[in-house]
Image (cartoon, rainbow, N blue to C red):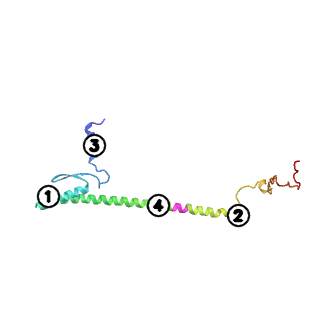
Amino acid sequence: MKSSRSRSRNKNRNNNRPSGGNIVNRVFDSSGPEGKVRGTPQQVVEKYTQLHRDAILSNDRVNAENFAQHAEHYTRMLAEAQKEIDAKREEQEKQNRDRQAERDRERQERLKAQEEAAAAAPVEAEAGDTGLVETPEETAPKKRRTRKPKVRPDQPPEGGEAPEAAE
């Protein structure tokens, strides 16, 4: 079993490691000469730039240079993170274009196959080759059924005889 001391060391070690997440939105605690500066890289850069201006106005060249270097550090971090974001975005857009091109190719192949099947279907019907075996019923001449005409009461039957009148 681990002691609580080693657990706390591991916990601290993991917290100090930079997560591979989005640096642009990550909050940093920067320890500068004037104390801690906390915020996103953009906010930290703005704060150190303001401190740099203030140091120049108060004729403190050492602190002005220190603040300028801090601002430059976070500016470079921000620029690098933005390059990575842009590269990921480009890669994702390329993958999306490739997937769309593949879907378009498959759709064209399906349409072409359907057109070929539709064009081949009438040719097969004309040739009479359906691939089925003929049965004797199909080869025998078909008899045509006719209906008997309905007899109306006001017409004479077909035999030419008039209906007898009831007396």
Is 45 a magenta residue? no
Q: Which badge, 3 or 1, is on the more N-terminal residue?
A: 3
114 lies left or right of 138: left
Q: Amino acid at mark 3?
A: Lys
Q: Which badge, 1 or 4, is on the more N-terminal residue?
A: 1
- Mark 4 — residue? 100
- Mark 1 — residue? 63
Q: Amino acid at mark 2?
A: Glu
Q: How far from the left and from the top, in percent, is residue 58?
A: 11, 60
Where residue 41 sits, quadrant-wise, is bottom left
**Which residue is pictured at 59% across the width and 61% down the height?**
114
The nearer-to-camera label among 2 and 3 is 2
Q: Are marks 1 and 2 in contact (CB under 8 Å)?
A: no
Q: CA distance from mark 1 to mark 4?
A: 55 Å
Q: CA distance from mark 2 to mark 3?
A: 81 Å
Q: Which badge, 1 or 2, is on the more N-terminal residue?
A: 1
Q: CA distance from mark 4 to mark 3?
A: 45 Å
Residue 132 marker: none
The nearer-to-camera label among 1 and 2 is 2
Q: Amino acid at mark 4?
A: Gln
Q: Secondary structure at mark 4?
A: helix
129 lies left or right of 29: right
Determine crowd level at label 1: few under 14, some 14-19, many 20+ residues with C-alpha closer than 10 A: some
Q: Which badge, 2 or 3, is on the more N-terminal residue?
A: 3
**Which residue is pictured at 16% across the width and 61% down the height?**
53
Q: CA distance from mark 1 to mark 2?
A: 95 Å
Q: Are marks 1 and 4 in contact (CB under 8 Å)?
A: no
